């Protein structure tokens, strides 16, 4: 993979939560794109099914910390692998669209305020 791809996926500009939300939006857009293979679309669905299924590799009752970590690891691996297996040009297209939407909402308005009672 190219270094360009890594920059598109892990953009720390704006914090962890903003990056997480952007990744979820990207996955949603890729899932709805007909150009992405249906076999690749199985990955995030399978990861989500594992998360909600009663079957667990490391049950939280027996291993409290490890039980939560394995669920998080499966979700992370499933989502990352899904984005990596999607065609680069489609991922780039959707990322640019998300960047354009995000940059429009991050505009700063330079203005002065005044108190209504001063008039």
Image: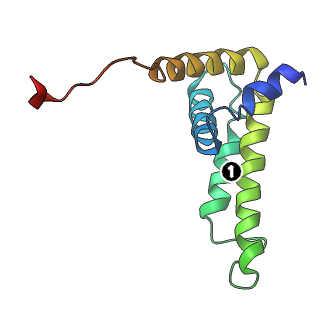
Asked which quadrant contains residue 43, the reply is top right
> Is residue 18 shown above or below 56?
above
Q: Position of residue 108 (x, y in %)?
A: 45, 20
Q: Nearer the viewer, residue 84 or 69?
A: 69
Q: Position of residue 60 (x, y in %)?
A: 69, 78
Residue at x 71% of width, y 59% of height: 72
Q: Secondary structure under badge 1?
A: helix
Residue at x 53% of width, y 19% of height: 103
> Is residue 27 shown above or below 44?
above
User: Which color scheme is applied?
Assistant: rainbow
From the image, tell me which residue sits under label 1: 46
Q: Position of residue 11 (x, y in %)?
A: 71, 31
Assign the N terminus to one quadrant of the image. Answer: top right
- Residue that sits furthest to the front in the current view: 118
Crowding around mark 1 (Cα neighbors within 10 Å: few <14, some 14 to 19, many 20+) is few
Q: Is residue 29 left or right of residue 68?
A: left
Q: Position of residue 3 (x, y in %)?
A: 88, 23
- Residue that sits furthest to the bottom in the current view: 62
Residue at x 78% of width, y 19% of height: 88
> Is residue 55 shown above or below 36?
below
Asked which quadrant contains residue 73, the reply is bottom right
Q: Is residue 37 left or right of residue 27?
A: right
Assign the C terminus to one quadrant of the image. Answer: top left
> How many tags in the picture?
1
């Amino acid at each position: 993979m190219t270094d360009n791809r890594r920059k598109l996926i892990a953009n720390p500009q704006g914090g962890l939560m903003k990056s997480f939300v952007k990744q979820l939006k990207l996955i949603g857009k890729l899932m709805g794109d007909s150009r992405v293979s249906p076999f690749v679309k199985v990955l995030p669905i399978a990861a989500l099914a594992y998360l909600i299924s009663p079957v667990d590799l490391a049950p939280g009752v027996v291993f409290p910390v490890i039980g939560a970590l394995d669920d998080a690891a499966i979700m992370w691996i499933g989502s990352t692998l899904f984005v990596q297996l999607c065609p680069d040009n489609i991922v780039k297209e959707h990322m640019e669209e998300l960047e354009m939407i995000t940059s429009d909402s991050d505009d700063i308005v330079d203005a002065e305020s005044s108190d209504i009672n001063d008039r």
